[in-house]
Image: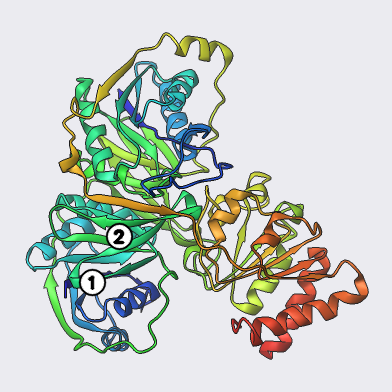
Amino acid sequence: MANVLVFTELHDGKVKPVTLEILGKLAGNTADIAVMGDIGADQVAELAKNGAANVHKLKGANLDKYSPEGYANALSEFIKSKNYDYVFGGATSMGKDLLPRLATKFQAGLASDVTNFTMDGGTFAGTRPFFAGKCLAKVEITGPKPHFVSIRPNALGLTANATAGAGAVSDTNANAGEIRAVIKEIIKAASTKVDLTEANIIVSGGRAMKNAENFKILNELADVIGATVGASRAAVDSGFAPHAMQVGQTGKTVSPSLYIACGISGAIQHLAGMRTSKVIVAINTDPDAPIFTRADYGIVGDLFTIVPILTEEFKKLLGK
Amino acid sequence: MNIFVCVKQVPDTETKITPTSDGSFIETASIKWIMNPYDEYAVEQALLIKQANAAANITVLRVGSVKDTEALRTAMAMGADEASLVEAGDNLDSYSIAKALKGAIEKTGKKPDMILAGKQAIDDDALQVPQILAEMMGLPSVSVIVGFELAGTTVKVKREVEGGALEVYEINGPCVLATNKGLNTPRYASLPGIMKAKKKPLAQLSLADVGVSEADRRVKYSQFRLPPEKPAGKKFDAMDAAKQKEVVAQVVGLLRTEAKII
């Protein structure tokens, strides 16, 4: 049994789902939570239900907004005051930036972007993809403790019968220390949708979309089923979509419950980025397109006629 | 101004990956190696700085096997001034690589004003080395940058976060910046550039030279294997307009009744 700290991020006041995925998988160990600033009672209850023993709120000057140095300084001071064997976090934008820096403050190792793990005898052993999922490898951590782990969102899944924890809340004075990379401004994204890496449903368009304007039909479908819209490298390189929307080896690796590929042929580097999607639907006019080898449900047809029908059928199904 | 650019050599994105029979790594004999695509943006950014500041010099660094020196030669053909290669086996962890890069920088005797690197390498996708290097060197860092403006010693960068939102950071002084696609358009190496690159200095160092040993390993990777194959799915023909509605309704139905996903 290990003594574990899970760093959680809030999004619109809600705990990111990857935190609950991690807690569920840590059943049988002692898991505390660290969060920056305040957290609502309903969120504490959710964490406790999933196994959180203590919820530590770190509060101090210059910690209202993320900065790599400020968060790493504050968290390292807090972790040094405790006795954790492991520190977990989500492999989110923030987690990917913060955790390597934080781990290095302890000269400790970080297993990043882990998709599954065990804690037999209180020792971590994980699985992570290599080459964007073209192969998998076992990952273990050695050297000074605590050991650090980042978990890819949507990979573990939620545990249905989690063991509840006490969820005892306490405040900790935290010190951001010297911040040299100073955050000046946050420019909001045009879309308020959840990021591709954390999306439960993704609708993606490829070269066959022909232009940026045509992504409108994917947006309409996405709105009906609560999806985030993605794109293939071919579509991004042709200027139909920004790089932030790219799925694949040189874009984002995603693992939604449902991935709908529209007019995407399925280049090896695209397949690598979306192969862990639970269910894949592909729409393409070429019956021999490689995407069909990965699709659970393949529709050989023209996306410009199929997608609008799909939108209508989903509307009917969902009673919208 | 001393600029360092860290690059990695990785298999081309079209490469079919085959784990070795003992699972210790992957078969590397017939791989086509390229410079990690995200590192091209780092090299290009360094060259853009040098264009505006002729006194700047660019050193490219790489830690890895010597099977091919493609990545370093490419960077020098694009315009970097010199290079250091730290010879190391495959399957090294991020902590050891970062420590080796730090050692290689110190070996040059030059004090870094800026260290650039791709945000991640497309082999292990660890997304760790730039931040570890920054912490080891006591420097600030910003990762996943898609915007860059330099005015005097102050650099303003845009970091891309979830959903395409941007965090704007300002740093005065030396720093580590990790680049993302979209930052700039990397140039191609010209033929004269390729010829010149052959004469540019390339220092070769061992891990021992830069003070790295097996004791620096923090993460062990083993049991490399292919992911389980999915069973074949169902395919429906909807090229005929008369069948489209029926096929789509059937697939939507299956998503609910069979896949239980919606």
Q: Which residue is mark 2?
A: A66
Q: Amino acid at mark 2?
A: Tyr
Q: Marks 2/1: CA distance?
A: 34 Å
Chain hosting mark 1: A
Q: Position of residue A176 (x, y in %)?
A: 17, 58
Q: What residue sits right under mark 1 in the picture?
A: A120
SS of the residue under disc 1: helix
Return the mark for residue A234.
Answer: none
Q: Quadrant of the N terminus of chain A?
A: bottom left
Q: Nearer the viewer, residue A251 or A60?
A: A251
Residue B138, by quadrant, is top left
Q: Is residue A163 above or below residue A111?
A: below
State the residue in front, A21 or A186: A21
Q: Residue at x 32, y 67 (%)?
A: A117
Residue A241 visible? The answer is yes
Q: Is residue B48 left or right of residue B92?
A: right
